[in-house]
Every structure is written in C-alpha cells, then in structure tokens.
Image: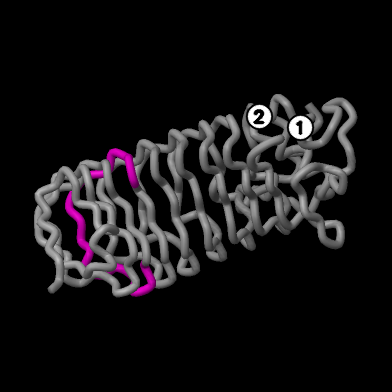
C-alpha cells in the first residue's frame, strides 16, 4: 500500500518517530482513518475521499486540523482501528467516544500540543504509558474500554485536571500521593486495582475521587481530605477506618461494602 511505502521513507532513525512534516494535512488524516471500516461516515465515499475541509467533525484553522470530534450519532457506528501516530501535530482535541473502535494505541506519538483526548466507550486494548502522554494534556478519558496493565499516576502531566479510567482492567497498586496539583477529578471505578491507599496528600483542588469496585485493602487515613471534595467513593473495597464528614458532604461519601465508619460532624 502507498501509505506503508511512505512510512519507511519518513522515519527518523535516530528518534524512531515519523516525520509528519513530510505529509500534507490531508494525507495525515487519511492515514489516521485508514483502519476504520466504515470511514464513509466521516469523509464520504471511501474510494474518493473528500477534502478534509468537508469531513464531518473536523475543525480546521488556516489549513490545519486543530480539533476532531467523532462522538455520538451519526458517528457512533465507527468500527475498525485508528492510527493515532499519524495525527497532525496541530491537533489539540481528539474525541471518539461511543464508537466500536479496537486495537492498541501509540501513546508516545500523540501531538505534543494535545490538551484533550477522549477515547471513552470503545473496545481499545493494551496498556497506557502515562509517562509518554503530552505534557500539555489537561483532559484524558479512557473509560469503558479493555485497557490493562498498571497505572503510573505519578507520571500524569502537571496540567492534568481530569483523568477517567473507570471500567477497564487496570491492575496493581496506585500512588495517590504524587498526583498533579491541578487535578480536580479522578475516576478509577471498577478495575482490578489493589494494595493500600494513601489519601493524606491529595491535591487541594480535588473535588471528586472514585476508587470504588476494586480490591484495595487496609486501613485508610481519612483525616486530611481536600476541603474542595464533593464526592468520595471508596465502596466495594476491603478498606477500614473512620471518616468524619459534614452534612453537605455526607451523601457524597460512599463507603458501602467496606469496614469504614462514616460519622457526621456535629
């Protein structure tokens, strides 16, 4: 195939990366969707692709693709795989939630300026190298897929405010003491995570933390929770301890099926 031949001519052997500058935005985007079985939902006739200016879900500024949104109807039927390594370096947001996309992803090749990546509710597999995602990333959603492996949360970019990884197959322990200071929402619900939990050094900005339905165990210190906290889900874990909460927060703290005692601050 032409794309395969071009690839070998454009790899920087010293870096092991593709030289995106060798291709037009049109060619790059065509390679991104090469593995999608029903690409006509995006670009019309698969045998005679439209100019990217006419593609559905693309925002193009000065000839460069800056945002891609293939979420929900009528794009919810996308099937096949994506080649994220071909994303133009200009892309800042990429949303493909609620599709049926499969395969593994090359995290190291994401555009360095990318701020939002939303892959939720697909069939992606493989591990996630959080240490390889762009430093500019603010929002990352990989929820409701089949990702596996460990989660090195200490490697999340400093700019990260939202990270959703619920309903996957992540395993191992997690370090919650070195999260980004800007993090507001962390959702790890319904995985296979285990080990102890240290909640004494959560970011002061954190409003929502969901670690329910995992295999965390041990006594947890809940005396130093962030004042901004609105929701804390520790349910369905083998945890014990005691937490004192205000009337406003009482319903937002879920300790069902644990040995944690929840007490109301008088």
Residue name at image x 45 percent, y 38 percent: 144
For marks 1 and 2, the one nearer the N-term is 1
Q: Quadrant of the N terminus?
A: top right
Q: Picture coordinates of residue 93 (x, y %)?
A: 65, 55
- Which colour assignment does the render follow? one colour
Q: Is residue 170 magenta?
A: no
Residue name at image x 36 percent, y 36 percent: 169
Q: Is residue 19 visible?
A: no
Q: Quadrant of the C terminus?
A: bottom left
CB under 8 Å between discs 1 and 2: yes
Check disc 1 and report the residue beneath it: 41
Q: Is residue 160 visible?
A: yes
Q: Foreground: 208 or 61?
A: 208
Q: Picture coordinates of residue 228 (x, y %)?
A: 34, 72
State the SS at label 1.
Answer: helix
Q: Foreground: 26 or 233?
A: 233
The part of the chain drawn in magenta is 189-206
Residue name at image x 42 percent, y 47 percent: 165
């Amino acid at each position: 195939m032409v794309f395969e031949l071009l690839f070998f001519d454009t790899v920087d052997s010293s870096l092991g990366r593709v030289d995106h500058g060798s291709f037009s935005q049109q060619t790059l985007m065509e390679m991104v969707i090469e593995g999608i079985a029903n690409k006509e939902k995006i670009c019309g006739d698969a045998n005679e692709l439209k100019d990217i200016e006419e593609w559905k879900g693309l925002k193009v500024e000065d000839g460069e693709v800056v945002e891609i949104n293939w979420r929900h109807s009528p794009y919810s039927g996308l099937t096949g795989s994506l080649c994220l390594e071909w994303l133009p370096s200009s892309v800042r947001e990429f949303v493909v939630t609620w599709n049926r996309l499969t395969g593994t992803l090359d995290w190291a090749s994401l555009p360095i300026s990318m701020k939002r990546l939303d892959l939720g509710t697909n069939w992606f597999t493989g591990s996630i190298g959080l240490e390889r995602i762009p430093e500019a990333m603010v929002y990352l959603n990989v929820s409701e897929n089949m990702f596996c492996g460990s989660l090195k949360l200490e490697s999340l970019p400093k700019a990260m405010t939202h990270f959703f990884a619920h309903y996957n197959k992540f395993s191992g322990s997690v370090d919650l003491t070195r999260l980004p200071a800007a993090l507001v929402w962390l959702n790890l619900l319904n995985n296979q995570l285990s080990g102890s939990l240290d909640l004494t050094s959560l970011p002061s900005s954190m409003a929502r933390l969901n670690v329910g339905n995992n295999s965390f165990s041990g006594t947890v210190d809940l005396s130093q929770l962030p004042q901004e906290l609105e929701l804390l889900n520790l349910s369905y874990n083998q945890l014990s301890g005691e937490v004192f909460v205000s009337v406003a927060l009482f319903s937002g703290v879920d300790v069902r099926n644990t040995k944690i005692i929840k007490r109301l601050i008088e």
